[in-house]
Amino acid sequence: MQLNELNNEKLSSLVEMIRLTKPEELTCDDLLAYVATYADACVKDLPVPVGSEPVQQHLSICSECMEEFQSLVNVLRLR
């Protein structure tokens, strides 16, 4: 994206993403170690596993991981 392609909506979106970013957070690769347990708890309506805050944080800001998480949840519901 070139600077001249930024409009107010895109700029606001970028600022919001920066605001939501925490100093230490999971990367997409890191998320893979935790997402199955988190998804299983969500599907079974169990309490969110202790320490899941980084998983929730990452899913709230990463649309690609959220899409994969939703697919995993859908598969788990079919069982």
Image: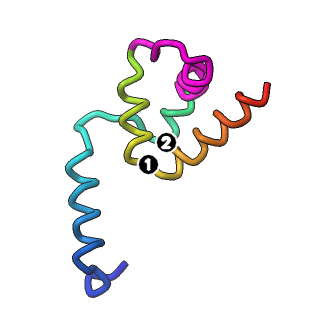
Q: Residues under labels 1 and 2: Cα distance?
A: 8 Å
Q: What secondary structure is marked by label 2? A: helix
Way the structure is coloured: rainbow
Residue 26: give x, y in percent of width and height.
40, 35
Q: Nearer the viewer, residue 26 or 7?
A: 7
Query: Is 32 contained in the magenta span?
Result: no
Question: Which mark is nearer the camera, 1 or 2?
Answer: 1
Going by the numbered disc 2, the residue's amino acid type is: Cys
Going by the numbered disc 1, the residue's amino acid type is: Cys
Q: Is residue 67 above or below residue 34?
A: below
Query: Is 42 contained in the magenta span?
Result: yes
Residue 33 appears left or right of 18: right
Number of numbered discs present?
Answer: 2
Q: Residue at x 55, y 24 (%)?
A: 42
**Residue 20 location, quadrant:** top left
**Residue 58 location, quadrant:** top left
- Judge the density around disc 2: few (<14), some (14-19), many (≥20) Cα neighbours within 10 Å: some
Badge number at residue 28: 2
Q: What secondary structure is marked by label 1? A: loop
Badge number at residue 34: none
Q: Residue at x 79, y 24 (%)?
A: 79
Q: Is residue 50 above or below residue 26?
A: above
Verify CB contact (< 8 Å) between mark 1 and mark 2: yes
Residue 52: give x, y in percent of width and height.
41, 22
Segment tinted magenta in the rendering = 34-50
Give the residue pinned by disc 1: 62
